[in-house]
Amino acid sequence: MTPLRLSVLDRSRTRRGREPGEALRATVRFAREAEALGYHRFWVAEHHSVPGVAGSAPTVLAAAVASATSRIRVGTGGVMLPNHRPLVVAEQFGVLESLFPGRIDMGLGRSVGFTDGIRRALGTGKEAMGGFDEQLAELAEWFGGGGRRFPGVHAFPAEGLRVPLFVLANDAGAEVAARAGAALVVGGMTGGEATAAAIGRYRAAFTPSPWRDEPYVVVAGNVAVADTRDAARRLLVPEAWALAHSRTHGAFPPLRPAEEIEALDMTDRERTFFEDALRGHVHGTEEDVAAALTALVRRTAADEVLITTSSYDTGALLDSYRRLAGIPLPGGTSGT
């Protein structure tokens, strides 16, 4: 049995007092480190008008990451398809695959902007999420030889290429990935009943497609590794506070140092959201994390784990990823 595949999703999180460009450059440096550590793939994400996230143009950033690396797979986690025309998405990934053949992943999601203002600026609305299946079907047409609704139009250079498709889904969206014949990316590091059930539905309903012959499951979430459980938990504090702040103030802020957050006089409501945000992750020593991830794979039969952890302390965060890469984990697959 091959070792479990571990991959990275980096959202180019900004840090208080630092320019967004610094976060983007840090993402490229981080990708080099992830490649050297043996991670399987490195993904970037799409967020718009979020003070705490610099990654707004994932295919552009993916090109920079791929240019700075040589072996690791590079992709998106993901491009939000309702925000774009499928033709343009096909063209962008066609360019990436043509420049970096055999290394590009096309991870797509169905989210739209989280406020009315952002959605209006993007020219889309909440109803666009309901057409995700149709958008995926149109995308497949562009890769296959042209959209049937647009005779004579071709998505060069994507036409004829086969870029692995991953669909980001919550528990209720697993069937979308199955119908599309795509790999499934689902959150749920604890491998709870809802996550396991969604994966089961995906595997049962999977339809082979030009994208993929067999089902493939990636479980995504935060993993933090340190000398002690407390030190590992503190790595999760900045992101947990950013989420709690967004729930109570309406804006997702840049990351702050853990020690500042721990010294805050939180309201009861803030404390509730903060504590909730610290739950459901894998953290601890190497032994703790090895046991947790092994149990996760047993419960879900996941083919891969995608690590999404962000923190203010970049040195401690990189040490966590180094420690994680050194943990022997059974499982894995021979698929892409």
Image (tube, rainbow, N blue to C red):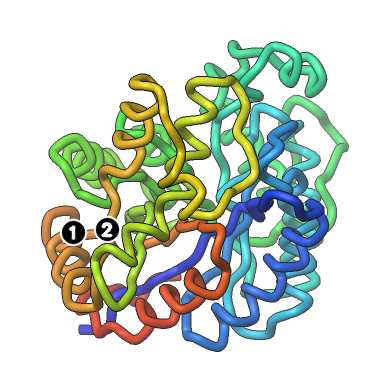
Vertical order, 12 against 99 (above or below): above
Farthest right residue?
152
Q: Secondary structure at mark 1?
A: helix
Image coords of residue 300 (percent x, y) = 18, 54
Q: Earlier in the sequence, mark 1 or mark 2?
A: 2
| In this view, the mark in front (1 or 2) | 2
Q: Which residue is mark 2?
A: 282
Q: Nearer the viewer, residue 301 or 22?
A: 22
Q: Secondary structure at mark 2?
A: strand
Vertical order, 9 against 110 (above or below): below
| Residue shown at the point (36%, 64%) measured from the top left | 224
The amino acid sitting under disc 2 is Val
Image coords of residue 143 (percent x, y) = 68, 49
Left-right relation of 288 to 146: left
Q: Are marks 1 and 2 in contact (CB under 8 Å)?
A: yes
Q: Nearer the viewer, residue 317 or 151?
A: 317
Image coords of residue 138 (percent x, y) = 65, 33
Image coords of residue 321 (percent x, y) = 44, 74
Q: Residues within 10 Å of mark 2 (few under 14, many from 20)?
A: many
| Residue shown at the point (39%, 71%) measured from the top left | 6
Task: Name the image quarter holding the N terminus.
Answer: bottom left
Q: Which residue is mark 1?
A: 296
Left-right relation of 96 to 308: right
The amino acid sitting under disc 1 is Leu
Q: Which mark is residue 138?
A: none
Q: Nearer the viewer, residue 210 or 132?
A: 132
| Residue shown at the point (48%, 72%) measured from the top left | 316
Q: Is residue 216 visible?
A: no
Quarter-of-image position of residue 51: top right
CA distance for labels 1 and 2:
10 Å
Vertical order, 4 against 200 (above or below): below
